[in-house]
């Protein structure tokens, strides 16, 4: 960003990840509304009596301020905004999944105000999920918004030849190209029904087949853009299912 970043105050933010730095400090990866993903140095945050220590929690809306120059700036203050219940159960797990996606896919210091609002809204929905049970429609909606914001928007209403998607046809979804119509339902990689593409476009997951196919399609697309990086949350989820 070309602007001078010596001092910023009152910036809405969420903590995505943090890790120890030297004896008593933390490096905190934050997602901010106006500056995107940033790495900030929280000096002394690991000291037992550090006031800031209890504030730097994931999934909690904060207002933060920082100062300095260079790649890692210094976190000067953090205030808890409130209004966001703690996540539990499956919802907590999904929250970590969202954070991992943002950590891996969001470039540093690239503002995405709409995505920030989507993420904040998604955390509210996760917190309100009955018994922590997450709606797949919410996850698909966030994954779609993330790819759209990063410039990888999905082609769901038209096929690669520009023709409207036919709900009764079958398509192979090809990276960077979109849906390619098939003559019949073949065993090609990533085959989806036209109905699934249209349901994913409308974010309507009432059809069980659409739910299953949309999940598989989004997983393939995200794996492609993650370029081989395996998500820890997905690995843990797989191990839990095997148990």
Image (cartoon, grey):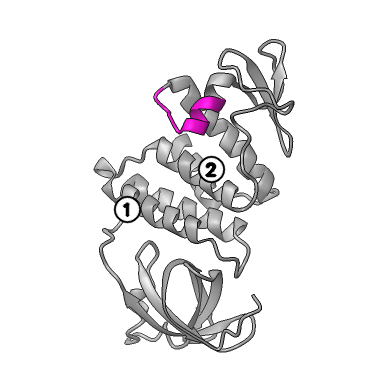
Q: In x, y percent, where is residue 134?
A: 36, 41
Image check: 25 left or right of 131? right
- Magenta segment, which residues? 197-206
- Whole-angstrom CA distance, mark 2 to mark 1, is 18 Å
Image side of residue 76 versus residue 186, left or right = left
Q: How crowded is the residue under tag 1: few (<14 C-alpha within 10 Å), some, or many (20+)?
A: some
State the residue position of label 1.
Answer: 124
Q: List the residue tagged with mark 2.
A: 144
Quarter of the image with the C terminus in it: top left
Residue 59 circle label: none
Label 2: which secondary element: helix
Helix, strand or loop at mark 1: helix
Q: Residue at x 60, y 17 (%)?
A: 166
Tell me which label, 2 or 1, sits earlier in the chain: 1
- Residue at 61 percent of width and 81 percent of height: 3
243 vs 134, nearest the viewer: 134
Residue 199, magenta (yes or no):
yes
Compared across the picture, whether 79 is left or right of 105 comes to: left
Where is residue 74 drawn, in percent x and y?
Answer: 51, 86
Farthest top residue?
184
């Amino acid at each position: 960003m070309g602007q001078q970043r010596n001092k910023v105050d009152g910036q809405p933010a969420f903590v995505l990840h943090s890790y120890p730095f030297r004896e008593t400090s933390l490096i905190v990866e934050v997602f901010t509304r106006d500056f995107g993903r940033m790495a900030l140095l929280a000096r002394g945050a690991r000291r037992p009596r550090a006031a800031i220590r209890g504030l730097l929690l994931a999934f909690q809306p904060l207002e933060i301020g920082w100062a300095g120059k260079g790649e890692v700036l210094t976190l000067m203050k953090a205030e808890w905004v409130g209004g966001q219940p703690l996540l539990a159960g499956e919802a907590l797990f999904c929250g970590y999944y969202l954070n991992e996606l943002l950590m891996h896919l969001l470039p540093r210091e690239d503002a995405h105000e709409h995505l920030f609002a989507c993420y904040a809204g998604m955390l509210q929905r996760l917190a309100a999920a009955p018994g922590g049970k997450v709606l797949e429609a919410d996850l698909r909606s966030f994954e779609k918004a993330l790819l759209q914001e990063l410039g990888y928007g999905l082609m769901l209403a038209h096929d690669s030849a520009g023709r409207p998607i036919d709900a009764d046809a079958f398509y192979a979804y090809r990276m960077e190209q979109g849906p390619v119509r098939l003559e019949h339902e073949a065993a090609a990689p990533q085959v989806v029904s036209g109905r699934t593409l249209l349901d994913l476009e409308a974010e309507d997951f009432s059809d069980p087949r659409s739910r299953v196919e949309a999940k598989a399609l989004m997983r393939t697309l995200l794996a492609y853009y993650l370029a081989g990086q395996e998500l820890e949350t997905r690995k843990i989820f797989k191990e839990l299912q095997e148990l």
